[in-house]
């Protein structure tokens, strides 16, 4: 058997790591997935290569995150390896080894925001973002679309790319009013430099295969065609599955595989998904076959009956309405941006962030400079209920000279009063005050 | 005394070893029209040189099964498959009859869909009309739950004598390989049994009652009964015989080493890591078919002592083709062997003819004879070096699945080289310079394969899986699928695995002190249903008889 697209498979189940003994993010999570893949003979398919992950460095992490007090004290080796797995996926594709790559690694990352005090939604660092920013430094600038198909809103990825016009973020998820983390409203559209490039598609509980494909065909694909990304990344969370214990959706392995085939991502990264016996083995097999361009029609869950998981008319109507609303915002993004930000010099955003896994409440104020020359320097001032307080300054990759200068000034003045971090993406430099 | 016989493509070698000392050896050409006669002639000649009554065991490394497969002399096998949901492989070159049945179990061995008796009845009708002589029955995830395979076998038991069940051949997961392995096993079964019975009969007539063991591709042996039920395990044992011979002839330091067997057409590479052989991760490939037959890892490269040497567009090329014998041995194609003869490193039967040919070829390219001969030998060494490097890159990138293994980063860095084969001794100096490593060439290296066959020890590997929620444990290699208690734990699983390995080892005639049963891999996963549910365990243990030698060869003096 020969793959139509060569695929680098970074399969790293980390059989010796868990958040805790009975936590969903435990050693067993990818055990049955690996069993299924091995029994199917995935290793013997010509064109599918099993690749070991590398290990991200703290510098790779600091490019994306402000870790408080520092990356070293928050992260375990498993986090660096999961991120290193995604970096390896980028190397495989951008280095020309394989056409596509799938990082089947754990723990996930899409709830990790720029500021990190601890674990949120089983994530500490955003593994896609660490991989992507590494790739941009190594292989040069690129326009990227990240399509997050996890059932939970990818609030971490949203936060990291909130003001980056070169990174289109599309998340479809179960409506935040019914599921963690609660965000992901259609009106969260992005910062002043990237307004409209954060696309949230909140779906009603019990959305089935038909609903996901409707959204894909009528919203996601048209947006991607217009955006024309250089590469497409799929944050392939698998908890929209009808058997997932933490969510309420009705997506199937066939549905996931068909979605992946149509989306045609260059790189996929496993995110959540905790139906480790009933869903993951089949969804992952389906995604791998779809990415490799092979027939996935035989991949069916043991308990799948189409009739049982077909979505109701009411859900179909709701999905259709949401698609219309999202499309309208995309088409009018310029107009809406002018209305929202007009001639603002700076845009301020106050937020509360709850770290459910670590049990920390954070309050932060972000400030985005509106610059005609570049996406603009931005900063975040944050404190939490454990008494920590910090500031983080980000100089974007394409920063103009003035914004860069301003970034250093902001950093120096913040450093007088609190622990402060500076990401100079334009020079791939990172500073932290003592 | 142990008798070892290795039948290769052209030669058949025999060795008799008593208390670690080589006391007799023979070498003959293989008669391809009668393999049994070739082996018997060799055995008979050895037995005539020793005291028959002192023979404790006879070890055979044969190409009986290998040749049957490669030459396509296979029984008419019907494959009965339960592919279940998932990837649909196409099974080519697996005979004319493939029957797909419904019914499947999942990755834990839990019943998904039962077998359909009406389908079985239909299959039977269809099969009995045809010329089928053997069946291979394989179900997806049968190593997790073999009940379907057992039921299907039972259903056909009165109709067919030869029925191979996939799960009995390996505990490893890989359905397409399990299918091929089961097919090949059923397909060579009759041929191998005929051979084994002839062997038994001939020994009986010669009043020899020493047990016969057969060499496997993993460098271990299996008794004749075991080989008759799993003849596929006896394929491609030749390289393993050479490998074991090298282990017997040289001291085994706990270091990383490359073992090189230089043949006429090809050169085989093997690797040791900390003195432990590297195995194929899943199984060996034969005639383009990937199987689950456990095997030493080896890489064959298309360059050997008899490879064709010529210039192509001004560049020196060696192999991969060969055209008969070297000029120095009566052929007429330039070879590395001729270069070595020219340089005075090897003896040749037609030395003058060889010298002239090298001189002539050198003159055509404006070289001195010695310069050309050096160039040929060094190019051969360089190709071997590059092949070693490619293999090391591949081996060093083998997938790992735990943080511990990933961080250990066990990169293989050879510290020495061992070499056998026709031109081994003459090549070792050059190879040492190219590889910048010490190269050892053992004495008796020309019959290392027969010595290896003689001194190889029985081996086996078992894969235990216990699922405390299902209260089931399986060891496919032992045909075990038995109930366990919900409290069953990793320690008990390890002990059980070791006791099973020991029991199997004793059945193969290994004494207690030579058993060397060991746990290779062992892990226990907590299984949690939903949030805060009861915690069960999914336990996985791999155990084996450590591959190795019955004894080392000692110097006779």
Image: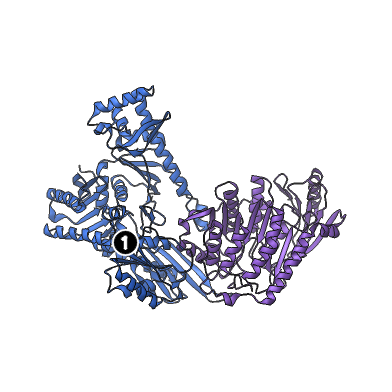
Chain colours: A purple, B blue
Nearer-the-camera pick, A271 or A146: A146
Tag 1 secondary structure = helix
Residue A292 visible somewhere in the drawing: yes
Q: Is residue B261 above or below residue B119?
A: above
Residue B63 or B131: which is nearer the viewer? B131
- Marker count (numbered): 1
Task: Tell me the crowding category of disc 1: few under 14, some 14 to 19, or many 20 or more residues within 10 angstroms, Cα based.
Answer: many
Residue found farthest to the front: B129
Give the farthest residue toward the right: A343
* Residue A130: x %, y % from top left: 65, 53
Give left or right: position of B81 versus A233. Answer: left
Q: In the shown orientation, is residue B541 left or right of residue A248? A: left
- Residue A344 occupies quadrant: bottom right
Q: Chain of mark 1?
A: B
Q: Which residue is mark 1?
A: B185
Residue B464 in the image: above or below residue A378:
below
Q: Position of residue B397 (x, y in %)?
A: 49, 50
Q: Which residue is drawn at the image coordinates 59% and 63% (left, top)? A: A258
> Where is residue A73 shown, x and y percent of the image?
64, 57
Q: Nearer the viewer, residue A68 or A199?
A: A199
Q: Position of residue B306 (x, y in %)?
A: 31, 37
């Amino acid at each position: 058997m020969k793959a139509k697209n060569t695929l680098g498979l970074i399969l790293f189940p980390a059989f010796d790591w868990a958040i805790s003994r009975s936590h969903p993010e435990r050693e067993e999570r990818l055990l049955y997935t690996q069993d299924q893949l091995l029994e199917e003979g995935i290793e013997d398919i010509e064109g599918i290569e099993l690749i070991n992950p590398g290990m991200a460095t703290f510098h790779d992490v600091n490019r994306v995150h402000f870790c408080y007090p520092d990356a070293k004290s928050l992260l375990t080796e498993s986090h660096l390896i999961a991120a290193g797995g995604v970096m390896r996926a980028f190397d495989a594709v951008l280095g020309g080894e394989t056409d596509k790559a799938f990082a089947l690694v754990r723990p996930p990352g899409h709830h990790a925001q720029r500021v990190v005090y601890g674990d949120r939604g089983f994530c500490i660092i955003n593994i896609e973002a660490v991989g992507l920013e590494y790739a941009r430094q190594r292989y040069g600038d690129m326009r990227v679309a990240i399509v997050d198909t996890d059932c939970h809103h990818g609030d971490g990825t949203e936060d990291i790319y909130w003001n980056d016009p070169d990174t289109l973020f599309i998340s479809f998820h179960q409506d935040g009013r019914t599921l963690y983390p609660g965000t992901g409203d259609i009106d969260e559209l992005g910062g002043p430099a990237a307004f409209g490039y954060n696309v949230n598609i909140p779906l009603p509980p019990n959305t089935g295969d038909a609903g996901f494909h409707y959204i894909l065909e009528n919203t996601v694909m048209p947006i991607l065609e217009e955006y024309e990304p250089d590469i497409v990344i799929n944050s392939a969370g698998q908890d929209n599955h009808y058997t997932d214990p933490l969510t309420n959706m009705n997506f199937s392995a066939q549905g996931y595989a068909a979605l992946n085939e149509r989306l045609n991502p260059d790189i996929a990264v496993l995110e959540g998904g905790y139906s480790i016996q009933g869903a993951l083995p089949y969804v992952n097999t389906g995604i791998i076959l779809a990415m490799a361009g092979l027939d996935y029609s035989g991949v069916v869950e043991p308990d799948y009956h189409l009739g049982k998981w077909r979505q109701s008319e009411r859900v179909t109507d709701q999905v259709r309405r949401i698609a219309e609303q999202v499309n309208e915002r995309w088409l009018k993004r310029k107009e809406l941006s002018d209305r929202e930000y007009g001639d603002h010099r700076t845009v301020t955003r106050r937020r509360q962030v709850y770290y459910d896994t670590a049990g920390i409440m954070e309050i932060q104020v972000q400030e985005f400079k509106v610059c005609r020359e570049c996406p603009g320097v931005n900063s975040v001032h944050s404190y939490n209920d454990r008494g920590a307080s910090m500031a983080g300054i980000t100089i974007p990759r394409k920063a103009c000279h003035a914004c860069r200068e301003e970034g250093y000034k902001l950093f120096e003045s913040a450093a007088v009063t609190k622990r402060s971090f500076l990401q100079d993406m334009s020079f791939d430099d990172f500073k932290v005050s003592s | 005394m142990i008798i070892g016989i290795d039948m290769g493509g052209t030669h058949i070698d025999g060795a008799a070893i008593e208390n670690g000392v080589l006391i007799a050896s023979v070498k003959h050409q293989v008669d391809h029209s009668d393999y049994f006669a070739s082996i018997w002639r060799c055995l008979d000649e050895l037995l005539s040189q020793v005291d028959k009554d002192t023979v404790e065991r006879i070890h055979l490394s044969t190409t009986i099964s290998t040749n049957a497969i490669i030459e396509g002399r296979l029984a008419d096998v019907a494959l009965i498959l339960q592919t279940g949901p998932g990837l649909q492989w196409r099974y080519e070159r697996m005979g004319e009859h493939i029957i797909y049945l419904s019914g499947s179990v999942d990755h834990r061995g839990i019943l998904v869909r039962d077998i359909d008796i009406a389908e079985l009845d239909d299959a039977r009708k269809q099969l009995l009309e045809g010329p089928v002589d053997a069946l291979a029955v394989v179900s997806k995830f049968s190593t997790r739950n073999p009940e379907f395979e057992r039921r299907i076998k039972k259903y056909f038991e009165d109709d067919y004598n030869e029925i191979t069940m996939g799960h009995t051949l390996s505990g490893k997961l890989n359905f397409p390989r399990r299918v091929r392995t089961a097919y090949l096993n059923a397909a060579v079964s009759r041929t191998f049994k005929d051979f084994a019975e002839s062997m038994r009969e001939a020994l009986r007539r010669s009043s020899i009652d020493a047990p016969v063991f057969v060499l496997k591709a993993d460098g271990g042996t299996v008794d004749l009964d075991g080989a008759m039920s799993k003849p596929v395990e006896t394929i491609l044992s030749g390289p393993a015989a050479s490998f074991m011979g090298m282990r017997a002839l040289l001291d085994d330091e706990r270091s990383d080493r490359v073992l090189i067997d230089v043949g006429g057409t090809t050169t085989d590479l093997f690797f040791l890591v900390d003195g432990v052989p590297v195995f194929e991760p899943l199984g060996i490939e034969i005639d383009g078919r990937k199987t689950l037959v456990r095997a030493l890892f080896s890489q064959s490269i298309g360059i050997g002592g008899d490879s064709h040497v010529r210039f192509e567009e001004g560049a020196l090329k060696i192999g991969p083709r060969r055209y008969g014998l070297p000029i120095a041995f009566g052929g007429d194609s330039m070879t590395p062997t001729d270069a070595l003869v020219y340089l005075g490193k090897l003896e040749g039967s037609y030395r003058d003819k060889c010298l002239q040919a090298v001189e002539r070829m050198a003159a055509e390219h404006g070289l001195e004879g010695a310069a050309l001969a050096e160039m040929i030998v060094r190019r051969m060494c360089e190709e071997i070096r590059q092949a070693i490097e490619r293999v090391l890159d591949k081996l060093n990138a083998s997938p790992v699945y735990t943080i511990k293994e990933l961080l250990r980063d066990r990169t293989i860095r050879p510290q020495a080289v061992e070499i056998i084969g026709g031109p081994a001794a003459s090549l070792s100096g050059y190879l040492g310079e190219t590889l910048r490593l010490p190269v050892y060439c053992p004495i008796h290296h020309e019959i290392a394969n027969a010595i290896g066959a003689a001194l190889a020890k029985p081996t086996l590997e078992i894969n235990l899986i216990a699922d405390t929620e299902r209260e089931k444990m399986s060891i496919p290699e032992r045909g075990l699928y038995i109930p366990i208690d919900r409290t069953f734990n990793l320690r008990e699983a390890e002990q059980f695995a070791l006791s099973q390995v020991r029991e199997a080892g004793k059945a193969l005639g290994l004494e207690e002190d030579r058993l060397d049963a060991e746990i290779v891999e062992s892990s226990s996963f907590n299984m949690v249903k939903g949030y805060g549910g009861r915690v069960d365990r999914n336990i996985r243990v791999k155990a084996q008889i450590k591959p190795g030698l019955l004894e080392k060869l000692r110097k006779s003096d």
